[in-house]
Image (tube, coloured by chain):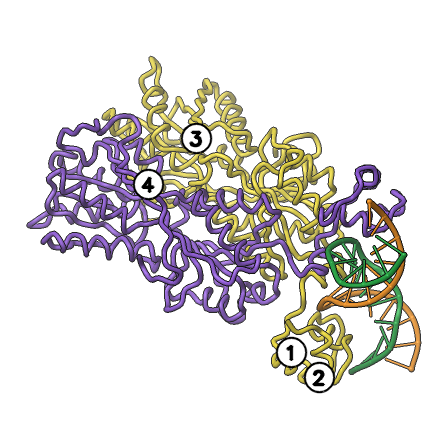
Chain colours: A purple, B yellow, C orange, D green
Amino acid sequence: MASIHQVAARAGVSITTVSHVFSGNRPVAEQTRARVVRAALDLDYRPNGAARGLATGRTMTIGLHFPFEGDSFVLNPYFPELLEGLSAEAAESGYGFLLIPPGSGRPGSPGTAMLRAGRFDGVVVADPMAGDPLMPTVRRLRIPAVTTGRAPGPRPAPWVDNDHRGGVRDLLRHLREQGYERPALLSVEGGFSYIQDVEDSFADEVRRHGARAVIVRSDGLSGEKARDLAIRLLGRRHPPDTIVAASDRQAQGVLRAAEDLGIRVPAELGVAGEGDTVLARHSHPTLTSVRVRPRRLGEAAMQSLMGLLNGAERVENLLLPAELVIRRSTSRRATASRPGASGGTVSPGRTARTARPSSGPA
Amino acid sequence: MASIHQVAARAGVSITTVSHVFSGNRPVAEQTRARVVRAALDLDYRPNGAARGLATGRTMTIGLHFPFEGDSFVLNPYFPELLEGLSAEAAESGYGFLLIPPGSGRPGSPGTAMLRAGRFDGVVVADPMAGDPLMPTVRRLRIPAVTTGRAPGPRPAPWVDNDHRGGVRDLLRHLREQGYERPALLSVEGGFSYIQDVEDSFADEVRRHGARAVIVRSDGLSGEKARDLAIRLLGRRHPPDTIVAASDRQAQGVLRAAEDLGIRVPAELGVAGEGDTVLARHSHPTLTSVRVRPRRLGEAAMQSLMGLLNGAERVENLLLPAELVIRRSTSRRATASRPGASGGTVSPGRTARTARPSSGPA
DNA sequence: TTGTACGCGTTATCAA
DNA sequence: TTGATAACGCGTACAA
């Protein structure tokens, strides 16, 4: 492997010049630069990352953690899209992602060793879970961190998030307009702030309009489990006339339950999902869902983190708006907006809001 | 951040001794070691990875690539499990995974820059696709590499793989024993060696027993698409009496098609999947499937790569046996093995085989 | 516009 | 059992 010295020698310049040709940190005469580039090409030279890191104190690496311990969240298209956004934004600036293994934060685990080894400049933690020792460890080690979704606890790390509460509010308003009166929420176990938001705002909103807040929880996102729970819900003495599911996969299970029980959707039962995944467009009937933007969230997370890395004392938290996409599964009254049309109907747009720096749930 | 010098000073020893306490590269007297550890603890010292990398020439980082360009393979539980295996094995030896972004290998892409920057000691490429420039680039840069599934081309990198061909053979034998005579294969687009293996061995085996090999391909793993294709298959003038799907999700779509058409499974139609995922155990009827071991495959991949990194000239390729798990969806004749019992029935076990170093498809 | 020389924090060689 | 010191390859303050 050629080093900067060999390139300098071959180009007839000093290593300083070679360095600056590759870092771009100071202007180099066009002629000189050409000679250097030529020499580097000839020798197949690539600047050594470790040496760079040693000299600059930067590793150009971001630690990345996903909540993938159980099976439950693996089959969720949310995370691949989030990763795309992170990746796109990181690529621009030469950052790479080092996976932080599950179980990191527990004393003595290999992941904790990695955290302690200073192998990255900062971390992105996707959907930190309540009770997970990772974020406390990250804070203790003073590693710059941004989370997608909010970490639990009093002074969470800077975060970016989807406005799930707003999404639920919009959805419930739409359901009221469609004449549904007894909504139930089919939620899921797990200590994510997203679930907390959905459940809290569902309960608040339903009660504010004088109804009882019925919430049941599945222990995974599977459609089968959702179907079973929905069947039980619909067999109650006073069954709900709408079921809002915490994910599109669960909503599909609800549709299946209705089909099995001979209950017509949307006439007798309204069904809505969350995430506006490909499932929502392809189920029968098509599914009303709350659209979030994992890709944009990933980009925003990296932007925040890079702010921190560039010396910003603190960065603003960011709440991305969620859009209600109305489709057949909740459209039982004719409206001007032709529900059921190709892509669904999007509720009146709202613009991105910036939340207060260390606010709790918005 | 404390450095080795400060620890040495505080412990009253040379930096050499501190170094050896942390690297374990030579014995240190118990008393001395205790003093060093104490000092390190007091100063919150952690060895600097970049400096280590510079001195040793090793980054303790493995590049990792998943075939996640489209949505299609994201929703496959195979990859999370593969990652678990890789991760477990890597953690033991202090290696971490740096994600190689999609599109790497194309000249000028950020991923290619990362490959060229020498940021890792080796790479693991999960299911390299035909036509992807990644593996050629990796070879050109002489980065030690192992693939899960085989890379296309004449002299592929060392690989570990599931014995899909053996799995298909066992499955077809079972189907013949159950009296099925006209199997069709519901495959999927995409240049993975795994698909090639399944299609090739299906065709070989079916023809060897004098039947016509019917193969149709979906352009994704979705259950909906599989259902539509299955409906078309079953509407043919001479419909198949068995449909073998390239994944459990597709097989579930086939079950749905049969249900919609009023075709009884397994009496009139046999259905089998691939992967033995949670879907197979939970569908109605339960699904016969070919079980593979992504977790063990991941472990094996890392072991092979670490062999390469430790100077092995070449490592043996490894073919892990696939097990046929017989459940209700193909069990129309009574057998001694009580198909449909809890976990399904596993075909006579075979032991892991080691393939010839640069063999093509086994 | 370019070059000299030092420092980054560690490992490895050689010596004691 | 331990230590002194030369790499490792790059960035950058300072000088020219």
* Chain label for disc 2: B
Q: Position of residue B261 (x, y in %)?
A: 25, 24
* Chain label for disc 1: B
Measured Cα–Cα span from mark 1 to mark 2: 8 Å
Q: Quadrant of residue B6?
A: bottom right
* Chain label for disc 3: B
Is residue B319 visible to the viewer in this orientation of the structure? no
Viewer-side residue, B119 vs A25: A25
Residue B149 horizontal side relative to residue C16, left or right: left
Does the CB distance between marks 1 and 3 fall below 8 Å? no
Q: Is residue B3 above or below residue B111?
A: below
Tell us which disc is closer to us: 2 or 3: 2
Q: Secondary structure at mark 1?
A: helix
Determine if marks 2 and 4 fall on one subunit.
Answer: no
Measured Cα–Cα span from mark 1 to mark 4: 50 Å
Residue type at mark 2: give it.
Answer: Ala
Residue matched to label 2: B11
Viewer-side residue, A353 vs A248: A353
Q: Position of residue B156 (x, y in %)?
A: 68, 36
Q: Position of residue A352 (x, y in %)?
A: 36, 46
Measured Cα–Cα span from mark 2 to mark 4: 58 Å
Residue matched to label 4: A291
Tell us which disc is closer to us: 1 or 3: 1
Around disc 4, counting alpha carbons within 10 Å, would you say few (fewer than 14), some (14 to 19), or many (20 or more)? many
Is residue B36 visible to the viewer in this orientation of the structure? yes
Numbered circle sitting on residue B40: 1
Q: Secondary structure at mark 2?
A: helix
Numbered circle sitting on residue B220: 3
